[in-house]
Image (spheres, helix red, strand yellow):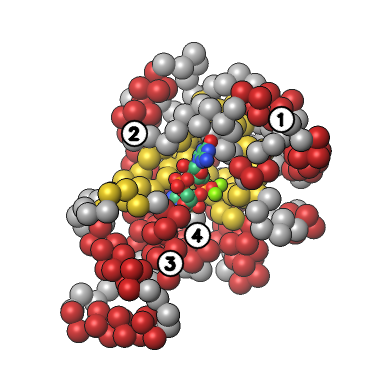
């Protein structure tokens, strides 16, 4: 990573020519400094079991508190990070922070699985799996405590590239999860080729399941298909009790959404967990649905 002003001026020209907006250029400039300045943080959103409502794990979601603009959504800055080649460093920071947090919770007696989001760009790093596994090891964590969430498109690209990162993670016991299922092409025949043990049904597929017979039919078939492929099913973006009920009846294993909890910082999450009826499942029962 070059730091000289000269090379940045060069970047500027190149990206201007490739059509980046002045706003994006400013953001990428700020993002370069955000890590060192401690402006990035992970928030954690619980996932609960559909039946008992016990904590199943948490998803780490990146937050950026910009000094002038306030909170900027990852939906805005992650694409900027990808475009300007910053996602590698930011992704590494996320992996490190997530592992550090889980190790710290574990030391306090809270055993909790954590999911991180990986972008397609990160999967192009051939040593990604090795680095993830060594980070887990350095923190004394079982690989089964980590879940990697990726969109279908990212997974398919990675498999076509043939770099084997996903297979390596899967073989080591890290869980791979298909994020935002139902927003891409959702090619059903491809589904069985993906080395994933979890499928996350996107919020867009959850909306309406309580009022629309057809939406419910789609949901039920996706759940059946995923189970037939030995995948655990998570529904995301659950906001209402009516949705929760239909999702549980349809056989979803795990639920996540504002109905249960919003993403929150690590301290708030600890408080949230303490207020629950039962704590996390013991490590021995963490392995994927082995029925
Ligand atoms: P995602 O992984 O699909 O995460 C779900 C998003 O839905 C999160 O938005 C979450 O805050 C939001 N959400 C959760 N429950 C509900 C609900 O009940 N209703 C509604 N309306 N929304 C809900 P967020 O945190 O803004 O993240 C947006 C996306 O940014 C994520 O989508 C993920 O693709 C990406 N992202 C976040 N953190 C990271 C990261 O560390 N690395 C990478 N590569 N991408 C990340
Ligand atoms: Mg996700
Ligand atoms: Mg998602
Ligand atoms: Mg999403």
Q: Is mark 3 within 8 Å of ligand 1?
A: yes
- Dot 3 or dot 1, earlier in sequence: 3
The reply to whether the C-beta atoms of the residues labelled 4 and 2 are less than 8 Å apart is no
Q: Position of residue 141 (x, y in %)?
A: 42, 40
Structural distance between the alpha carbons of marks 4 and 2: 23 Å
Up/down of 122 relative to 268, above or below: below
Residue 272 in view? yes
N-term-proximal mark, 1 vs 4: 4
The number of numbered discs placed on residues in the rendered structure image is 4
| Contact? badges 3 and 4 (CB < 8 Å) | yes
First-in-chain label (3 vs 4): 3
> Judging from the image, what secondary structure is the residue with disc 3 in?
helix
Q: Residues within 10 Å of mark 1 (few under 14, many from 20)?
A: some
Between marks 1 and 4 in the image, the one whose residue lies nearer the viewer: 1
Kind of element beneath mark 4 = loop
Pointer 3 residue: 82
Q: Residue 228, can we see it?
A: no
Residue at the spot 76% in from the left edge and 35% down from the top edge: 212
Q: Nearer the viewer, residue 115 or 11?
A: 11
**Residue plotted at (61% across, 72% down):** 161
Indicate yes or no: mark 4 CB to ligand 1 under 8 Å: yes
Residue tagged 2: 266
Q: Dot 4 surroundings within 10 Å: few (below 14), some, or many (20 or more)?
A: many
**Residue 210 image label:** 1
Query: Which numbered disc, 1 or 2, marks the residue that appears first in the sequence?
Result: 1
Location of mark 4 (residue)? 119
- Image quarter of the N terminus: bottom left
Image depth: mark 3 or mark 1 in front: 1
Beta carbon at label 2 within 8 Å of ligand 1: no
């Amino acid at each position: 990573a070059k730091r000289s002003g000269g090379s940045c001026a060069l970047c500027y020209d190149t990206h201007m020519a490739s059509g980046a907006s002045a706003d994006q250029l400013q953001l990428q400039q700020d993002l370069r400094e955000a890590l060192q300045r401690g402006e990035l943080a992970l928030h954690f959103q619980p996932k609960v079991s559909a039946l008992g409502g016990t904590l199943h794990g948490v998803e780490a979601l990146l937050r950026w508190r910009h000094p002038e603009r306030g909170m900027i959504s990852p939906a805005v800055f992650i694409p900027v990070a990808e475009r300007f080649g910053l996602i590698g460093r930011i992704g590494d920071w996320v992996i490190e922070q997530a592992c550090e947090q889980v190790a710290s919770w574990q030391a306090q007696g809270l055993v909790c699985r954590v999911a991180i989001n990986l972008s397609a760009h990160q999967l192009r790093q051939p040593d990604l799996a090795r680095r993830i596994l060594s980070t887990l090891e350095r923190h004394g964590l079982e690989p089964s405590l980590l879940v990697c969430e990726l969109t279908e498109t990212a997974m398919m690209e990675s498999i076509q590239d043939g770099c084997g990162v996903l297979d390596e993670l899967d073989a080591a016991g890290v869980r791979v999860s298909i994020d935002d299922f139902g927003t891409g092409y959702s090619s059903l025949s491809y589904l069985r080729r993906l080395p994933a043990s979890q499928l996350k049904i996107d919020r867009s597929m959850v909306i309406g399941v309580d009022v629309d017979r057809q939406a419910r039919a789609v949901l039920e078939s996706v759940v059946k298909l995923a189970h037939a492929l030995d995948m655990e099913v998570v529904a995301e973006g659950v906001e209402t009790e009516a949705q929760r009920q239909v999702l549980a009846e349809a056989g979803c294993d795990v639920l996540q959404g504002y109905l249960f909890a919003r993403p929150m910082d690590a301290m708030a999450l600890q408080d949230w967990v303490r207020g629950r009826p039962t704590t996390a499942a013991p490590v021995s029962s963490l392995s994927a649905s082995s029925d």
